[in-house]
């Protein structure tokens, strides 16, 4: 007898919609839970492999939770003005690394570079987990070693089957031996890892040696971003993590908030749009909920780190007093940074931290460091901050609060960036910070230096040698001959720079201003003398930039005013004067004499003893016919000219590494500098340094929009003494009246 299905069919017809809803809910629950299960499995895998020895479980959890695989590029995005608008070829990082690791070329290795917080260590951990999920036949044999760990080298030597193993060396910038001597440490690591199949190194972009600084004995060939270069033991390809695109930010926010919390997602999107830093440093995306809850307008990295820490202090208030934790954290960070070299790592053993903890009533042994703690404790009881940049922020915060700012403390690039944002407005009353400005100008990119210089001008540049005339600094140029003109090996030389000859006429000492005359200093002259500028634009630039739009006649008037002022004040004897340099004085100051002092001398005007002859000990000039102040190769990071990409004048002092042999700065680039000497077509004609007459005068040094031709020591330009231009400025010398 056939089975009657009609009752079942009737029931199904009556309950189809509820059943469909249940099935849909089950499927949705499965796909909603699947990423959580996968993340949990990934986390357990990494904790079992690395949790006790190298990576704290909290770091693993924070690195894998909501992880979005990033993109990479062969072009350094930090060199672009706006990181959110970089238009460079980008590829998925996992795909690029897979492709490189599977190549048959046994010499090809990878450098993964990015700024702090962009996800280098997160990539290493997630790629390891990604690799372990692959079928055995497709799986790489991987070893991961964070170089900041004190036992990293010993671990590397114990790795078995190195010829078949790919080793990831994570956080080269946290390797303390690298911070002391990156050349020696890099060579040592390459020798240590010589037996491995492949090597991948992660590092902060600004910390890793430039191609020209990589030691030859490391075996690393100089490779351009496109991979060009001669063959050597190792061929490293540089990859740069790129800032999160809108697509990747959305992917993160979907993971973070899910599909149902769309309002939170939209609010988070709006915050990211206002704070581009969040996409530049994906690590900080985890703190969007704190930003949302605070309602604050945050625009800088330092403000974001401050909020992040304050929220942590609040979360820990059940265990410790927030004010005590704040001070404890700053002092611990300072101790970690200052004593890292002696300890061998940026971690502090619990027994060493105990006295500081007791001072602030913090019971370390009872303190439960939970998932969102910014302080980590490893299996051996050592403490460190969850990310190095947190320690760096706290160190700068402490330094700015101190009465004295030790010039012996070396700051990292990240600390310098924090310092430039956090320096207080009344900067001029804190001269201890002047040294840190010099550090900023030495280690940041030219465009960053120019921005820092303008920020200093708005706050009140504390460098009195730049903003006053009483504290102007001068560099000693001893008596003696020098080479004048362009040598035969200068391919850009013009006939006007010939012939090269030994000039023996400067048989006297003179002092050259360390910097060009600034807007602030020229304003003092205008105010005191009642001078009406030929072009009012000369006073509109930031105060610490070189004055421009100045005629030769105006420069001479400034010199006469300052001579009279200093003679009346007893700073300058009657037989010395402030003058424009002669063309010969200028070129000798730029190139150096046949001999140079064994020790350079820089003095404020009040410190010069005019009644004495300094006659310093001399030694041969290693480059007496140098093309540029610093040597024979043009370098855009050593002067402000067109290749530097600043596009206008910059605060004086931005290029300390590009100084002359006598320590004169900005003689190349920024602005052309008026000289006292009348123009002559070449050096076969005698020089005329007299002030009388309306003849065309000499300008030297190049300018911000000229190419490298203009910044050569021997380059000459002529200008009508009544003309002013946007690139005409001047510096002065203090010299005897002959």
Image: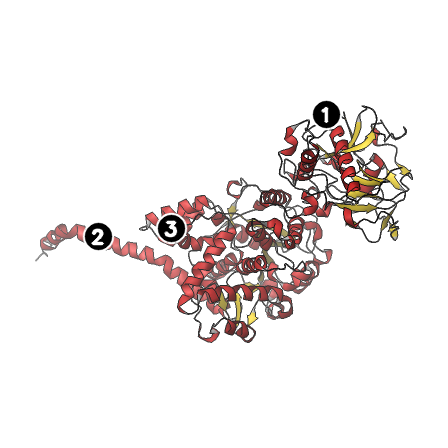
Sequence-wise first label, 2 or 1? 2
Sequence-wise first label, 3 or 1? 3
Residue 513 % position (x, y): 76, 42
Q: How many marks?
A: 3
Up-down relation of residue 423 to residue 154 (above or below): above
Report if residue 486 is visible in the image: no
Q: How far apart are marks 3 and 1 (CA)?
A: 62 Å
Badge 3: residue crowd in 10 Å (few <14, some 14–19, many ≥20): some
Residue 313 % position (x, y): 44, 63
Q: Say which mark, if any, is on residue 723.
A: 1
Badge 1: residue crowd in 10 Å (few <14, some 14–19, many ≥20): some
Element under disc 3: helix
Q: Quadrant of residue 409?
A: bottom right
Up-down relation of residue 356 to residue 248 (above or below): below
- Where the N terminus falls, by quadrant? bottom left
Asked if disc 3 and disc 1 are in contact, CB closer than 8 Å, the reply is: no
User: Residue under circle 2?
Assistant: 21
Sequence-wise first label, 2 or 3? 2
Report if residue 215 is visible in the image: yes
Q: Nearer the viewer, residue 16 or 209?
A: 209
Nearer the viewer's eye, disc 2 or disc 3?
Answer: 3
Q: Distance between the residues labelled 2 and 3?
A: 24 Å
User: Residue under circle 3?
Assistant: 254
Q: Residue furthest top?
A: 694
Element under disc 2: helix
Q: Which of 130 and 399 is in front in this view?
A: 399
Task: Identify the residue shown where x is 66% and y is 27%.
Answer: 535
Q: Which of 652 and 152 is in front in this view?
A: 652
């Amino acid at each position: 007898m056939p089975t009657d299905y009609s009752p079942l069919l009737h029931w199904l017809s009556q309950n189809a919609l509820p059943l469909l809803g249940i099935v849909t809910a089950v499927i949705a629950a499965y796909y909603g839970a699947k990423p959580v299960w996968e993340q949990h499995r990934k986390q357990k895998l990494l904790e079992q492999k690395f949790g006790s020895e190298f990576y704290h479980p909290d770091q693993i959890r924070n690195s894998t939770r909501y992880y979005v695989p990033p993109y990479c590029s062969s072009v350094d995005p930090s060199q672009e003005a706006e990181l959110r608008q970089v238009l460079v070829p980008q590829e998925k990082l996992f795909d690029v690394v897979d492709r490189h690791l599977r190549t048959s070329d046994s010499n090809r290795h990878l450098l993964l570079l990015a700024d702090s917080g962009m996800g280098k260590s997160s990539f290493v951990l997630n790629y390891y987990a990604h690799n372990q999920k692959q079928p055995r036949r497709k799986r790489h044999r991987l070893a991961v070693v964070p170089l900041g760990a004190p036992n990293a080298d010993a671990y590397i030597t114990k790795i078995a089957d190195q010829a078949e193993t790919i080793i990831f060396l994570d956080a080269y910038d946290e390797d303390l031996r690298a911070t002391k001597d990156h050349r020696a440490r890099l060579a040592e690591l390459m020798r240590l890892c010589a037996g491995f199949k492949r090597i991948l190194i992660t590092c902060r972009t600004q910390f890793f040696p430039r191609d020209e600084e990589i030691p030859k004995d490391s075996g690393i060939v100089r490779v351009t971003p496109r991979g060009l270069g001669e063959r050597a033991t190792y061929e490293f390809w540089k990859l740069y993590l790129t800032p999160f695109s809108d697509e990747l930010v959305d992917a993160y926010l979907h993971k973070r908030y899910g599909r149902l919390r769309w309002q939170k997602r939209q609010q988070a999107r709006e915050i990211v749009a206002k704070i581009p830093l969040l996409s530049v440093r994906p690590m900080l995306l985890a703190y969007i909920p704190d930003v949302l809850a605070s309602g604050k307008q945050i625009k800088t990295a330092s403000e974001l780190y401050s909020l992040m820490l304050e929220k942590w202090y609040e979360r820990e208030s059940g265990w410790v007093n927030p004010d005590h934790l704040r001070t404890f954290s700053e002092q611990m960070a300072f101790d970690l940074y200052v004593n890292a070299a002696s300890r061998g790592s940026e971690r502090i053993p619990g027994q060493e931290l105990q006295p500081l903890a007791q001072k602030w009533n913090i019971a370390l042994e009872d303190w439960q460091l939970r998932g969102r703690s910014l302080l980590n404790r490893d299996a051996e009881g050592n403490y460190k901050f969850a990310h190095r940049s947190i320690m760096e922020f706290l160190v700068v915060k402490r330094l700015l609060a101190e009465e004295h700012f030790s010039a012996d403390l070396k700051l990292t690039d990240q600390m310098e960036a924090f310092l430039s944002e956090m320096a207080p407005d009344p900067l001029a009353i804190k001269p201890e910070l002047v040294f840190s400005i010099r550090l900023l100008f030495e280690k940041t990119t030219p465009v960053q230096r120019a921005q820092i210089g303008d920020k200093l001008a708005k706050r009140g540049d504390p460098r009195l040698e730049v903003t006053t005339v009483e504290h102007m600094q001068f560099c000693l140029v001893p008596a003696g001959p020098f080479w004048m003109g362009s040598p035969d090996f200068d391919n850009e030389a013009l006939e006007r720079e010939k012939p090269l000859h030994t000039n023996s006429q400067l048989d006297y000492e003179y002092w050259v201003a360390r910097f060009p005359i600034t807007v602030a200093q020229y304003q003092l002259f205008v105010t005191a003398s009642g001078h009406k500028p030929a072009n009012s634009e000369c006073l509109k630039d930031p105060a610490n930039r070189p004055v421009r739009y100045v005629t030769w006649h105006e420069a001479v008037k400034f010199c006469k005013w300052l001579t009279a002022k200093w003679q009346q004040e007893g700073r300058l004897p009657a037989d010395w004067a402030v003058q424009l340099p002669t063309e010969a004085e200028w070129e000798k100051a730029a190139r150096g004499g046949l001999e140079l002092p064994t020790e350079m001398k820089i003095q404020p005007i009040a410190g010069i003893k005019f009644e004495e002859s300094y006659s310093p000990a001399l030694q041969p000039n290693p480059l007496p016919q140098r093309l540029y102040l610093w040597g024979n190769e043009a370098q855009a990071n050593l002067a402000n000219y067109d290749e530097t990409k600043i596009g206008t004048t910059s605060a004086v002092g931005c290029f300390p590494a590009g100084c002359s042999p006598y320590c004169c700065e900005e003689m190349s680039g920024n602005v052309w500098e008026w000289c006292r000497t009348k123009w002559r077509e070449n050096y076969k004609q005698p020089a005329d340094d007299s002030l009388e007459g309306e003849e065309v005068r000499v300008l030297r040094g190049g300018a911000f929009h000229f190419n490298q031709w203009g910044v050569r020591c021997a380059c000459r330009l002529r200008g009508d003494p009544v003309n002013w231009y946007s690139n005409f400025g001047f510096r002065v010398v203090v010299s005897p009246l002959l």
